[in-house]
Structures are given as structure tokens and as C-alpha cells.
Image (tube, rainbow, N blue to C red):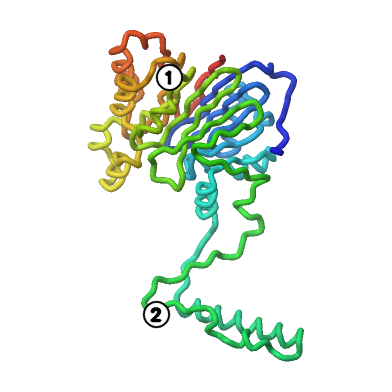
Amino acid sequence: MGPELHSPARYPQTMVRFTVLASGSKGNATVVTGGRTRILVDCGLSCRELFRRMKLAGEEPETLDAILISHEHSDHVGGVAVTARKLNIPVYFTEGTHRAWMRWLSPRRQMTYAQWLEQIRKQAAERQAEAVSEEGEPDESDLVLDSTPEPAESAEPAKLTESAPEKDPTWLPAVEYFAAGEAFEIGDIRISPFTTPHDAADPVGFVFDSEGVRMGFVTDLGYISPNVKAQLKDLNLLLLESNHDLEMLKDGPYPWAVKQRVMSRVGHLSNEAAAGFLEDDYDGQAAYVILAHLSESNNLPELARVTAERALNCRMRLLANLLLLAAQNEPLSSLYF
């Protein structure tokens, strides 16, 4: 049985609401409400800033039931631990994303070969002392110093996690795993996660289904792969990345290696790529299309909007779609169904 969900009477059971609190490279967070269930999708803001944004948007932090994580990059998980502890709610990850997040938070240090060898000697001596004190005679196996294989002198330095801090930074009230391609439910919301092409451990996008309303959510992808196209059908709302203008990125301040990463097939979606999907593959069923994760250095809201509008206007039957832009510094007004 899953964690108990909040059920505040002040929220009507039939309401579906979608609120983007922040979208961009400095932090991402969105609240999806369906029936009596409220999910925070990604938590890239500090807990304090998240709560401030929620209150600005008319959302109440204490009514959140769970946090759902798309991937482990800091602009999507930076505030997840503090927020989950503060609200005492579970966090949903893929197993690969959870492992990557834990590695990112765990402080590590390099050990030289000499330090590693000295540590092995101390451990062997401690085991020998324990064996003598407990049995009177040392266990032969504890006297063998080289029972653990030694690294070669020329090998890379071994890594060791330092002692855990007084409060483990990776501790969460509860962790729930899900897998791409396997739908699951959190309260009144059915979630269909799907794999996205991005340079993270196990990145995913989502389709949320509640009260007959379907909402697609996909950012941080280098291109729109066939499996992503298949998921973004028959939606009432589509949130889609429109990260950068290609010419601005090429002429912009990023180092060339970073530019290559952003433009790669595991990077971020350009205005042109998002527009290509809207013109050629989008079925036009959504009442709202939200452009998200706009770069502050390599894009302009006007460029993203014009490029997407041009794509939509090429297909007359799509004129009913309302095009919106999610921002980094302020929440987008809640959308109701």
C-alpha cells in the first residue's frame, strides 16, 4: 500500500489543475493536481523559494502528496531532500535516477595508493584485535593482510565515501521507484513515464491522466524520438521544451564543448526542433501548449513564441491551441480543467 495522501476538503474532487512554478536552467518545479491528489513534478528550487512560489500561485505546500523526479540534474532536484523532509512526503524516482542523485549528494574524496594501503593495514589490525579479545586466538583469515586485492601502482586512485555527515543528505521520508514504460498511480493521478534522450542516468517525461484530462510533460531532450512522439497524442495540455535559438547558442557565451552538448541528441530541444514537431507530428488536440525550459542566455521569449506560432499557424485546424510560455523567475498562472 502506498503512502497515505492528503485529502483537504477545501479542494473539489473533480478539479484538475496544472501550475508551472519555475522552468529553466536555474530551477524547475510544477504542481499537477487531479482529484484530491497534488504532485510536485521536479524540485529544482530551494524549499523556501518553492513555498514562496506556491503561495504566489495560490497553491498550498502542505497539501502536496508526493514529489516526482524526471532526472537527477541539479536544476530538477536541488531542493528535493529538504522539501520532502519538511513536508514528510515520498519521492518517486526511477532506480537509476535515485542512484545518480545519491552519488551526486554523497561527498567523496580521492585516496592515494599509500593511503589505501594504510587503511587496509589498520582494518586488518582491528579485525585481529577483535578476534583475540573475543576468542583468545586470532582467526587465521584475519591475519592475511592481502585478502583484499590491492590495486596496481599505476592504477587510478581508489575512491572512498567519507564518513556520513551528522544528517545524511540523501535521507528521505520515503522513496518509491517507477520504471519508464510502466504506468502507475499516485492517488487520483495515473502517470505514464517514458524515456527521453538526454545526458542523464535514466531521464523520463510524463503523461498525467486524471478525471478524463491528459497532460503531457517533456523537457530536457536532445530530439523528439519516435517513442516520445507516440506518447504526445490525445492531450488536453502539452508542456514542451523550447530551450534555445540555434544562432544565439552558436554566437553565445558558452564554451564550445557546452554548445556541442546542448545541440547534441542528448542535449536540449531548440526552438526550431520544437516547432518542427508542432508542424509535422503534433495532433493539435491540446487546449494549451506551454513552451518550457527557455535558456536565459541563448533564447528570447519572443523568438520561442514566434517560431512556435509560425508552426501552428501553418495548420489552420490548430488555431484553437493557446500558446503559453513558462518562465524562470515567476510562476505561470494555473490552468484549470
Q: Is residue 286 left or right of residue 161?
A: left
Q: Position of residue 113 (x, y in %)?
A: 45, 77
Q: Using the image, tell me which numbered label, if any, was put on residue 114.
A: none
Q: Helix, strand, or loop for circle 1?
A: strand
Q: Quadrant of residue 240?
A: top left
Q: Residue furthest bottom?
A: 137
**Dot 1 or dot 2, earlier in sequence:** 2
Q: Quadrant of residue 24?
A: top left
Q: Position of residue 204 (x, y in %)?
A: 47, 38
Amino acid at circle 1: Val
Q: Which residue is under mark 1?
A: 289
Quadrant of the drawing holding the C terminus? top right
Q: Residue at the spot x=63%, y=55% of the render?
A: 168
Q: CA distance from mark 1 to mark 2?
A: 58 Å
Q: Which residue is under mark 2?
A: 153
Amino acid at circle 2: Glu
Residue 124 makes an appearance in the image: yes
Q: Is residue 225 left or right of residue 17?
A: left
Q: Quadrant of residue 212?
A: top right
Q: Residue at the spot x=47%, y=28% of the render?
A: 217
25 is higher (above) or lower (below) than 164? above
Q: Helix, strand, or loop for circle 2?
A: loop
322 is higher (above) or lower (below) than 73? above
